[in-house]
Amino acid sequence: PLTVIDLINFKTMSSHLAGFLWVCVDGLGVKPCNAIIAGGTGSGKTTTLNTVTSFTPPRERIITIEDTLELQLPHAHVLRMETRPPNIEGKGELNMDHLVKNSLRQRPDRVIVGEVRGSEAITLFTALNTGHSGFGTLHANTARDLLSRLETMVLMAGMQLPIAAIRQQVTGAIDIIVQQSRMRDGSRKVTSICEVLGMEGDTIVMQEIFKYEALAKDEDKRSGHFISLGLKPHCCDKIIDNGVAVMDSWFSNMGERR
């Protein structure tokens, strides 16, 4: 499997972005951040998820839930669960929701969902709101579209909840949204990293921390640089309080230009 060094060499992300994601996923002694990797089909979400999940400390127990087994994690304590279609008699089906519920009974330190696409969304967010940690991927073009899709999934699952309650569940469960895109030349880029701050009235408030800025003269977007918007995420305050220094250069206005 590809490593974070490979993604940096492929210009999918910069070393600053990789370092920031490593700190968020590792947790460094505090509760780690929950992340969703969003993007279109073929944008490299699963590859990035595999790389980000490899930052998990080796002592933790990881449970992966996928439609098709794709993740390859270099950890000893990994339980891999795969969905199963019904048999010819229409029995024996195991969908993503069944597996997410079952995984919570197996004392996981991390729950990794290959792709959130249905009724398992509300089960996963309930788990993330009650002390579990996890990651997943979801098809969405922007971070704001991702939040709208999650609301739609919960409603399609038949949950009779007001929109405000659904948004409270989402904001309590997700800390970081990593947006990835496939460029016109076929390369994959992490185009944005946003932090979910909470609710302000009925609106979910987010702030963008990093983004990819393509050169205006390059129509194919084959070159550009990753920049920081100068905002230090709130999740770093917990890490700093734990006695770990966070590099201010990650969040300087100059960012890293490559």
Image: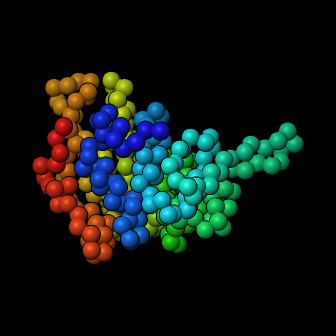
Residue 4, quarter of picture: top left
Q: Quadrant of the C terminus?
A: top left
- 98 with respect to 89 (left or right): left
**Image point (13%, 52%), residue name:** 253
Residue 37 against residue 203 in the figure, above or below? above
Image coordinates for residue 57, horizontal then vertical, percent: 44, 60
Q: Observer-nearest residue: 217 or 235?
A: 235
Q: Does residue 119 appear in the picture of this structure?
A: no
- Count of numbered labels shown in the rendering: 0
Q: Toward the viewer: 40 or 166?
A: 40
Q: Nearer the viewer, residue 36 or 170?
A: 36
Q: Residue at x 26, y 27 (%)?
A: 222
Observer able to see residue 25: yes
Name which quarter of the figure residue 13 lies in. Answer: top left
User: What residue do we see at 26% from left, 46% from top?
Assistant: 15
User: Residue 1, percent across and down?
Assistant: 47, 39
Residue at 56% over, 40% down: 70
Left or right placement of residue 11 versus residue 229 in this view: right
Residue 184: image location, x then y, percent? 33, 25
- Residue 169 screen position, x and y as percent: 48, 66
